[in-house]
């Protein structure tokens, strides 16, 4: 591992919150008890007003920043943006990042034991909605003594959670930062998710979701699902610049029988194989279905302006030019609805060739926009604390 620098949160230890009060789910079912894995960075101030919640995307988890050990080669998934002096400055904010229920990184999910059967939940784990995650996160906030978040931040599926927070618990959110997200998925997005799920379900080792009981894993199906998803997270220009038509093996010379393999093929297989051993197939199905089901304005007569009238916080909405999975047009729809609802909103469209993955990667303009907005929040906290 490279040496931990002064801008890293350093070594962090995951924590587990146990909840014994039943969680009523949008599906009508309930979890009698559940646990959430989470990490904290920075220090909570005296009146608990400097707390920021990080909502993860599809394959994210609680490990957003820092390292779990000196042997760990890579930091948390958003380490570039969380830490002392970084956009989400842990010298000013207390940052909470969690793994949602239904996940596979320690929170209660399909690979957890069903207390009624004493077997893994598997495909019998209840279907989830984004609001279920938000409700469980609110309970975690209660446990941590946080009545109101200075900001809730999320990219992609995380942005959907942040928006849902602003409607379900408007008095508990001061700022909502929505990055590369949408108020609902397009038909094309749902189609990509269904294709990925079918790849998993078609794997003989999926065993109708009961693979864990048979001590097998649908590696091939999960690998293909990840490859499908990964293609949609990249942009055509970015993929072309990184890989072009470079060959990894073989030749087009006449008389050569060795199969030709392009660098992009090798890269996608590597990503798929790595994912297939680190993520749970049932969790992937569950998460993508929650993504498909999300529709912010469904219960508001499908009127996003009417929906956002319930929010009380300020908003920052960010999109990326080459993101075709969650195109800038979707973010502009959010910003337009917020303005029509009379809400305070800032919008930035960032030039990038990194596609949907851009929200995770270093980008100077993105960092500047992000940093300046959060510096404004920190200044407001300082003024408020000085006035008390």
Image (tube, rainbow, N blue to C red):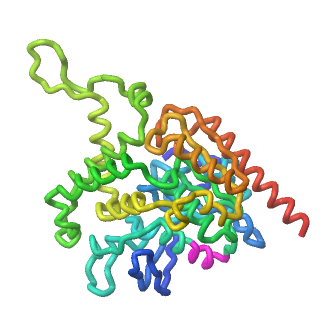
Query: In this orientation, does residue 13 appear?
Result: no
Residue 139 belongs to the span the image colors magenta = yes
Where's the C terminus, which quadrant?
Answer: bottom right
Residue at image point 22% right, 61% down: 217
When asked about the image quadrant of residue 384, the answer is bottom right
The answer to whether 200 appears left or right of 41 in the picture is left
Q: Residue at x 27, y 24 (%)?
A: 247
Q: How many marks?
A: 0
Q: Position of residue 342 (x, y in %)?
A: 72, 55
Q: Examine the structure image and report whether residue 151 is included in the region drawn in magenta.
A: no
Q: Residue at x 67, y 77 (%)?
A: 145
What range of the chain is rendered magenta?
138-145
Task: Answer with left or right where residue 372 lies relative to residue 267.
Answer: right
Where in the figure is residue 16, as x and y percent of width and height? Answer: 50, 74
Q: What secondary structure is the magenta-colored segment mainly?
A: helix
Q: Most extreme residue toward the top, as rendered? A: 254
Judging depth in this view, the residue of 69 and 176 nearest the camera is: 176
Residue placed most toward the observer, 115 or 373? 373
Q: Nearer the viewer, residue 106 or 186?
A: 186
């Amino acid at each position: 591992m490279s040496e931990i620098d002064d801008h890293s949160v350093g070594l962090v230890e995951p924590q587990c919150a146990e909840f014994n009060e039943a969680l009523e789910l949008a599906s009508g079912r309930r979890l009698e008890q559940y646990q959430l894995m989470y990490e904290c960075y920075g220090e909570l101030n005296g009146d608990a007003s400097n707390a920021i919640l990080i909502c993860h995307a599809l394959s994210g988890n609680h490990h957003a920043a820092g390292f779990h050990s000196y042997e760990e080669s890579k930091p948390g998934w958003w380490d570039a943006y969380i830490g002392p002096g970084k956009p989400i400055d842990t010298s000013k904010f207390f940052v909470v990042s969690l793994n949602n229920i239904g996940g596979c990184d320690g929170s209660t999910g399909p690979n957890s034991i069903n207390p009624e059967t004493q077997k893994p939940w598997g495909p019998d784990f209840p279907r989830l909605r984004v609001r279920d995650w938000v409700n469980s996160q609110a309970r975690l906030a209660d446990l941590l003594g946080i009545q109101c978040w200075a900001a809730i931040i999320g990219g992609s599926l995380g942005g959907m959670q942040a928006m849902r927070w602003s409607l379900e618990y408007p008095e508990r959110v001061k700022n909502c930062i929505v990055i590369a997200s949408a108020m609902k998925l397009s038909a094309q997005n749902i189609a990509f998710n269904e294709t990925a799920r079918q790849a998993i379900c078609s794997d003989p080792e999926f065993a109708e979701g009961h693979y864990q009981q048979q001590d097998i894993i649908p590696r091939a199906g999960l690998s293909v699902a990840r490859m499908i998803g990964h293609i949609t997270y990249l942009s055509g220009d970015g993929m072309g610049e990184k890989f072009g038509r470079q060959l990894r093996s073989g030749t087009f010379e006449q008389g050569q029988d060795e199969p030709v393999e392009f660098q992009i093929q090798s890269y996608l297989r590597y990503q798929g194989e790595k994912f297939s051993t680190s993520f749970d197939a049932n969790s992937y199905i569950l998460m993508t279905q929650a993504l498909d089901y999300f529709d912010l304005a469904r219960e508001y007569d499908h009127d996003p302006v009417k929906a956002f009238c319930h929010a009380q916080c300020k908003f920052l909405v960010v999109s990326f030019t080459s993101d075709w999975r969650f195109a800038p047009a979707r973010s502009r729809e959010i910003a337009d609805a917020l303005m029509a609802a009379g809400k305070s909103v800032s919008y930035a469209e960032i030039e990038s060739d990194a596609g949907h993955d851009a929200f995770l990667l270093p980008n100077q303009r993105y960092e500047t926009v992000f940093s300046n907005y959060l510096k404004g929040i920190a200044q407001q906290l300082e003024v408020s604390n000085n006035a008390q």
